[in-house]
Image: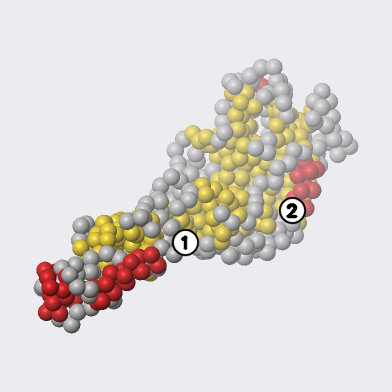
Amino acid sequence: MVYREGVGVMKTFAQKHYKLLVLAVAGLFVASIAAANLGVSADSSSIDFESPAYSLGNIDGQDGWTKTGGYDVEVADTTAIPEFSDQSLRISNAVTSGSFGDHAFSKPLTDEAGEAAADNGGLSGGTRSDYFAASLDFTSANPSVEQTGLSLNISPDRGDGARMSYVGLRDVTDGLEVFFYEYLVGPGGPAACDGTFPLTVVSSGLDRASVHNVQVEMWFNDGPSNDVVTVTVNGTDTYTGTSWEDYFTGCESTTTRTVDSLGFFTRGTAAPDTEGEGFYIDNIALTTEQADTEAPEQVDGMTIIVDENDLGCYPVINTRDIVVDWNDSVAADLDYYQYQADADTVAPFDFTTNVNASERAGTIRDEDGTYNYRVRAVDTSGNMGEWSEWCGVTLDREDPEVVLTNPEAGDVLSGEVEFMGEITDDNNQRHRFVVRDSDNERVYTSGNIAGTDPVVAASVLFDTKEYEDGEYRVILIGFDEANNNGRDATRVTFDNYVDNKKECKKGGWRRGVLGQEFRNQGDCVSHFSSDKQNKFNPDHWRGFWWRYFRFFWSRF
């Protein structure tokens, strides 16, 4: 668990974040850096404090180490610790001072690391790179008790105390603890020197009797406020912050510093009871390297898949289960993809995670709306490609609102009429009219009629004379892009046959269908006059048989 004490807000880095190399011993750490293809390796070293390079006692002058102050630091016998070699560095803060250059400094690397304009003070040199990594193992020299007040500062340095970062070890009530100080720019900007040094606990409650590993990685990026420092404890607890670059440029009005070694500082309040005890340090590994800065290409081919159907980007669906898919990255050193989901594509984004495959299956949250997704490729050096274009999907589980406005319930229809209605939906796609008879048999469908406006006025001309007189149901069905549908229906009567001379009036004679056609109202009245009712009327019977012929024919 990582938590922070003090004042300050976590810095947001505009540049890339980097993947940690999780290692437990110095030899593996150095080998893995070389194998990770981060770039051309400039320099590396491993320190195990073994004979003949090291002998028990004062560390000063041994294998390039320096320590000119009277601090409690020495090469000690650690044969009793199986994870350590026979000899290790022992250090406590029984003696402290406010000085810098006389503390213990590790053997420096030949090649330094830092920004292009960083000052090496004539202390480091060689080929300058932009990446520095350090790893070491530590444990308590007296694991049976809490060593009250025990504290140690370990910093990437150039050998004179010009610290570019700060990782601390201390013994507290519940065990050993690893903490980190970074410098965060204040509201006045880098030049104002109003920033803070917040303390972040990277890992706590560590067993005093166990050996633990701490790793520090630094990426030096030219310009202000953009260095990246990552601290990892035992390969699991991790914190990513920044360096002290803005302190030097803003508060000391100088350039940043280079690093080629580790400084072991005992400053602040002394803990005299820790003399001869403190911490054991072993398996130190240092590396400087020119990091790979070439980012992977932008990911393309974003698409939404539902039920194994490729729907492209921004389909409208009514199911929550989707797969977001994209083309494989062509980067040879691809490590993973960073995946983001957001409702409005405006920061802060709703969800960010890392995935290894070029797809991610998931369930949209239970709320209708549009959801957007994008990815970018990240290589083994932590370089991040450009984000892909956003690709989204709209979840719509609401049926369209459908109103049939004509005909109305109970209407008696004859001749040609216009069916009309209105469909309301944000994602309208199509609609159709259907007519069913009194047996619920479908006798007519208009087929799908396109209409994509949020409010669609639907209409179709329908000739009732092509159907038997009787009761029918007129239905309007609206569909949206997600295939949700709404409908409205009404019952009406088709009446196209003139049954008596009274119905001939007021233009009723015109309703006659095939087999019952009149020249005018008089012809209609004459047809139904009383003196003709008792006679065989071929026109009347022709209409009668035609109606029944049509009725039975429609049933086949």
Q: Is residue 42 above or below residue 514?
A: above
Q: Is residue 120 above or below residue 538?
A: above
Asked whether the viewer can see residue 277, the reply is no
The amino acid type, in three-letter code, at marker 2 is Ala
Q: Residues within 10 Å of mark 1 (few under 14, many from 20)?
A: some
Image check: 287 left or right of 325?
right
Name the residue rendered at 27%, 58% in the picture: 471
Q: Quadrant of the N terminus?
A: top right
Residue 260 spot, x, y in % from top left: 70, 49
Quadrant of res 489: bottom left
Q: Is residue 500 above or below residue 77?
A: below
Q: Is residue 118 above or below residue 461?
A: above
Name the residue rendered at 63%, 19% in the picture: 146
Image check: 547 left or right of 29?
left
1 or 2: tag closer to the N-terminus:
2
Name the residue rendered at 65%, 53% in the picture: 357
Name the residue rendered at 23%, 69% in the picture: 496
Q: Residues within 10 Å of mark 2 (few under 14, many from 20)?
A: few
Q: Quadrant of the C terminus?
A: bottom left
User: Mark 1 or 2, which is nearer the eye?
Assistant: 1
Give the labeled residue for mark 2: 36
Q: Secondary structure at mark 2?
A: loop
Image check: 8 left or right of 210?
left
Q: Secondary structure at mark 1?
A: loop
Residue 511 spot, x, y in % from top left: 21, 73
Asked whether the viewer can see residue 63, the reply is yes
Give the labeled residue for mark 1: 314
Quadrant of res 526: bottom left
Residue 354 spot, x, y in % from top left: 59, 49
Q: Nearer the viewer, residue 456 or 115?
A: 456
The amino acid type, in three-letter code, at marker 1 is Tyr
Image check: 519 left or right of 280?
left
